[in-house]
Each structure stands twice: as C-alpha cells, then as structure tokens.
Image (cartoon, rainbow, N blue to C red):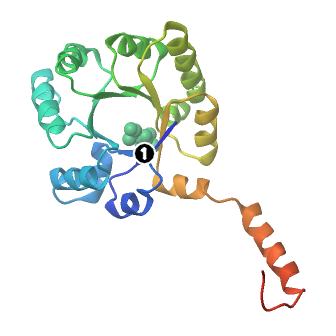
Amino acid sequence: MKIFLDTAQLESIKKWAFIIDGVTTNPTHLSKEGGDPSKVVHQICTLLDGKDVSVEITEIEPEKVYKQAKKITAIADNVVVKIPCCPIYFEVIQQLLSESVRINVTLLFSLIQGLIMCKFDVAYISPFVGRLEDIDCPGIELVQDLRTMIDQYNFDTQILAASLRSVHHFHQAVVAGADAITVPVDIFEKSLEHPLTKIGMQIFLEDWKKLDIDQFP
Ligand code: E4P
C-alpha cells in the first residue's frame, strides 16, 4: 500500500519524504508553484530518488504527447508519465509501454476505462474519487469495482486512488483495496492526528504530575 502526496510543493515533500512512497503532480500543482516546472520536477525526483513521481503531459496532439512523454521520462529514473484516459492517446500509450515507459493513466472515471488500461498493462490507473462525487456519482465504489476486476482477471496494473478530498476518503480508499493513494498535504497531515490522542496524552500527563516525583525510571 503506497502513500503519495498530491502536490508539487518542495518543502512539504521534503518534510514528509521519510514516510511517503512518492508524489503525484499535475499541471495545476506545477502552475501553483510557479517558476520553471522542469526544474521543480527535477528537484522532486532528486529528493525522492527511487520513489515514484508522476508527471503529467501538457500537450494535446497525440504525436506531441508521445514526444513530450519521452522527454518527461528522461528527466529521472523514478518518473511515471501521467496521460489522461482518452481514446486519442491509446495508441501512444501502447507505443510508450512497448518502449518501457512507465505510465499512470489519469482522469479515469469508469470500470471499462480501467479494464482497457489494465489490458494495456499500464503501471497505474488513477480513478478520481472526489471529481466523481462532485457530479453525484459514487467514487469509492469505482475503486472497489476496479479492485474486484483486477483480482478476478489477475491484471498487474495498480490502482492509485486519486482526487481524495478528506481523511474519510483516504480511509475508504484503503478499505476498498487501492494499491496506492494520493492525498493533498493538508489531508495527509490531518490524517496523522486524532483529537482523542491529544486529549488522552493530556489526561495521562496531568495524572502523572499528581505523583510529584522527579525521576522515572
Ligand atoms: C491525481 O493524480 C490528481 O493530481 C489529483 O488527485 C486531482 O485531485 P482533485 O480532483 O482534488 O483536483
């Protein structure tokens, strides 16, 4: 079970590098960071050497997507190229896979899209849970259905649950059997804490003080 941060913020990635298994970036994240996106991606890949860093294509035309994907994959060994699950890119995806490019198929919203990508044998498929719920469709159910399908047919593709917007989504994606999840930094940090842990620590501390001893043990 891999935990990725859904961000391009270097400081947060540095802070949590000892726990996370990688990062997923997208054009929105890189645009928010500003500066030279090639440099930012390079820095993230260096920081997370050996861990997967997803980097999305920004070209539209399939031929240009192919060329851009080759350039993206050349940035570092740990790059995974993100390509939207759109039929105009299916041949490009197959070509890139035949050249051993690792691919994360993003913006995936249905079981059948997932089935086709599993048959292609891409490294990851990213079902977007939050965006499905935005249009009143059950996001976690898609993760569950993909899990069932992959296990039923023994595909090697990993499910990377994406567009998770709450700690509850994170929890549900784990229970649904995602191989990996990606969460924004604030949700990740929130998920590490629990108010009852803090309250419990306070109670123990106050009770301990009643003993009034200097040294233990
Ligand atoms: C995943 O790879 C995407 O970057 C991300 O999860 C999108 O999340 P959003 O729908 O909250 O923008």
Give the percent coordinates (x, y) of residue 87.
27, 14
In terms of secondary structure, where does tag 1 sit? Answer: loop
Residue highlighted by disc 1: 21
Residue 60: quarter of image: top left
Left or right, 137 with reference to 50 = right
In depth, the one of 147 and 21 nearer the eye is: 21
Q: Residue 126, position in %: x, y?
A: 42, 29
Packing grade of label 1 (10 A; few <14, some 14-19, many >=20) is: many
In the picture as drawn, the residue positioned furthest to the front comes out as 217
Q: Quadrant of ligand 1?
A: top left
Relative to 72, is 27 on the left or the right? right
Which residue is depicted at the point 37% across and 61% down?
Answer: 14
Left or right: where 189 falls relative to 28: right
Q: Is residue 89 visible?
A: yes
Name the residue located 29 percent from the left edge and 49 percent from the top edge.
49
Q: At 31% across and 44% down in the image, what residue appears? A: 50
Residue 174 image-quadrant placement: top right
Q: Which amino acid does label 1 sit on?
A: Asp
Percent position of residue 171, x then y = 63, 40
Query: In this orientation, does residue 136 appear?
Result: no
In the rendered view of the protein, which quadrant contains the C terminus?
bottom right
